[in-house]
Structures are given as C-alpha cells and as structure tokens.
C-alpha cells in the first residue's frame, strides 16, 4: 500500500526526433528499456506484478532473447555492448530517484527479480569472460563505478550512493568499499586543531556525517559483516587521516567510529542537526552489534 505522505514519482523518457531514431536504431531499444523501468519505479503505480512484468520485458530485450517483433532495422547488438548500454540507462535512472524515495527500493526489487529469472543461460561476453544471464548481473559493477566517477552534483551523488548502499545490502553488487570511504571521510579526515583548516571542520562534518549515517541505516548490517571478516585489510581503501592502526574494515576501526560519533555529538563545531545525526549513527551501530549478538 502506498504511503500518502510520499511524493509520487514518474519516470520521464528521453525524447528523440524521428531523424535521430532513424540514424541510431539503438534508441528504440533504449526507449523500451525506459518503458519497462517505468513499470517498476513509478510510484505509487508499481506493484509486484508490474515489477515481474518489467523483468520479463527487459529479459526479452537482451539480444539472444529478442523476438523478431522487438527487433530494430539494424543488426543485433553485441551482448557485452548491450549490457554496458543497458546498465548505463539504469544508472541514469538512479540519478533521478531521490535517495529516500520508495522508487529506489522498487528498482532494487526489479534487479533482484531479473537476476532470479529461471533457467539462466551462460554466454561468452567479449573481453569479460563467461557469465550467466541474468544470474550474474554481468557488467553492472563496472558501469556503476564509472557513474560514480562522472557525477558532479552533491544531490546526484547522494541518490547514487544511497542506491549503491541498497545494492550492497541486497547482494546485487558489493560497494561496501564506498561505505568504508564514507565513514573514513566523516570520521577520520580531521585537520590538526592548530591548522587553519580546523576552523572549516564544522561544515565538513555537516556534509559528511549524513552520508556515513545513510550507509549505516541502509547497509549497516552488511558493513558489520565486512568488519567481522576484516574485508579489504590488504587493500588501499580509506588510508591516511587519523586512523593508522589497520587497513580496511576491522572491529578496532568499528569501535573507533563509535568513539568518533560520540565525540562529534558533543563537539562545538558541527551544527545541532549534525550532532543529532551522530547520536543516531552511534545508536545504529550499537543496534547492529546487538543484532549480531555482540
């Protein structure tokens, strides 16, 4: 049942001239992808049945699965090229989905439904290797990594990062390293209190603490699982700053983050809303530990 307090969302398809469509047959497939996505993400119109229908529609657009009545006048795309363009369309849609809107969860459900379609078929993707369609969701990770690299708006980054946290929680693709970076930037990048930059720490905390909390709220349990196995301990993610004990996720680092959230909550530099978010983050971390029996 839709929440009447949540704003409706309607996906807007790009528009093209007849000349553009005639020149680039792929556009017809792109628009069909948008039509299928709209079935899943439009709010409050989307339902379980419409999400299932959208997954079937998208499956039929994959070149080896595409029936003649859906074919364009051009040759079928190379499967790897199709997948790159396909996930790129979805990445563009994610940028439009507000970080706290149900449409983000609906898109996650669509990708899960697509992944779980019966009878996955192995296919050789040029330069990528052999994958199962759609069980392996091939090329999704690289496309979204590229999307992260090219975003230049704080609002867009928030939407994309929230979606990647949801994808991590759902096991669609593991972007927990981005959660690690968000906590690192919020809690471990701190100038010396004698430096001029220390005076700007308040606005930095105001910007970074909400991002760290968002990761804990959406995918905190997954991050804690990474803590327990010390994920990325041999990688170069989130190095530098005030934390110099170990790399990657660790219980010691998790405990340090709890300590830092407690310090930010009583610091004089951040705004009162940021202090409250820090208290909320600390509470969430304790809650996650309790769920794991720790």
Image: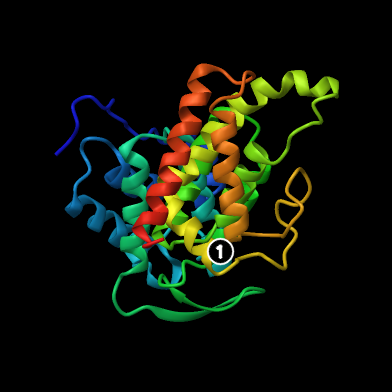
Q: Residue at x 54, y 40 (%)?
A: 212
Identify which residue, 58 or 138, lies in the foreground.
Answer: 138
Q: Is residue 167 left or right of residue 205?
A: left
Q: Give the quarter of the image for residue 217.
A: top left
Identify which residue, 59 or 202, lies in the foreground.
Answer: 202
Q: Residue at x 37, y 48 (%)?
A: 287
* Image vertical order of residue 37 relative to residue 60, above or below: above
Q: Residue at x 74, y 57 (%)?
A: 245
**Mark 1: which secondary structure?**
loop
* Image vertical order of residue 174 relative to residue 20, above or below: below
| Residue 106 visible from this viewpoint | yes
- Outermost left residue: 1
* Image vertical order of residue 276 relative to residue 45, above or below: above
Q: Position of residue 41 (x, y in %)?
A: 32, 42
Q: Position of residue 70 (x, y in %)?
A: 35, 59
Q: What residue is shown with label 1?
A: 139
Q: Classify the position of the N terminus by image quarter.
A: top left
Q: Position of residue 90 (x, y in %)?
A: 47, 48
Label 1: how many residues lie within 10 Å, few (<14), some (14-19) or many (20+)?
Answer: some
- Outermost right residue: 195
Q: Is residue 129 left or right of residue 275?
A: right
Q: Give the quarter of the image for residue 291.
A: bottom left
Q: Position of residue 88 (x, y in %)?
A: 54, 50
Q: Classify the position of the C terminus by image quarter.
A: bottom left
| Residue 60 visible from this viewpoint | no
């Amino acid at each position: 049942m839709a929440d009447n307090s949540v704003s409706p969302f309607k996906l807007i398809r790009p528009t093209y001239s007849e000349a553009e469509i005639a020149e680039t047959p792929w556009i017809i497939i792109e628009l069909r992808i948008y039509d299928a996505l709209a079935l899943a993400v439009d709010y409050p119109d989307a339902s379980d049945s419409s999400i299932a229908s959208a997954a079937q529609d998208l499956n039929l657009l994959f070149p080896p699965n595409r029936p003649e009545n859906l074919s364009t006048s051009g040759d079928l795309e190379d499967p790897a090229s199709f997948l790159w363009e396909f996930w790129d369309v979805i990445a563009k849609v994610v940028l439009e989905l507000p970080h706290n809107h149900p449409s983000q969860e609906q898109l996650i459900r669509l990708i899960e439904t697509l992944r779980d379609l019966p009878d996955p078929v192995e296919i050789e993707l040029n330069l990528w290797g052999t994958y199962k369609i759609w069980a392996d969701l091939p090329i999704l990770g690289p496309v979204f990594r590229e999307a992260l690299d090219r975003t230049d708006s704080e609002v867009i980054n928030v939407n994309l990062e929230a979606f990647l946290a949801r994808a991590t929680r759902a096991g669609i693709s593991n972007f927990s390293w981005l959660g690690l970076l968000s906590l690192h930037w919020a809690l471990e990048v701190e100038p010396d209190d004698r430096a001029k930059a220390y005076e700007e720490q308040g606005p930095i905390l105001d910007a970074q603490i909400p991002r760290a909390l968002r990761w804990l709220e959406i995918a905190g349990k997954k991050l804690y699982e990474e803590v327990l196995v010390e994920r990325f301990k041999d990688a170069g993610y989130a190095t530098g700053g005030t934390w110099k004990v170990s790399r990657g996720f660790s219980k010691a680092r998790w405990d340090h983050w709890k300590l830092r959230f407690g310090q930010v909550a009583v610091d004089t530099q951040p705004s009162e809303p940021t202090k409250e978010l820090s208290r909320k983050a600390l509470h969430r971390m304790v809650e996650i530990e309790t769920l794991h029996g720790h």
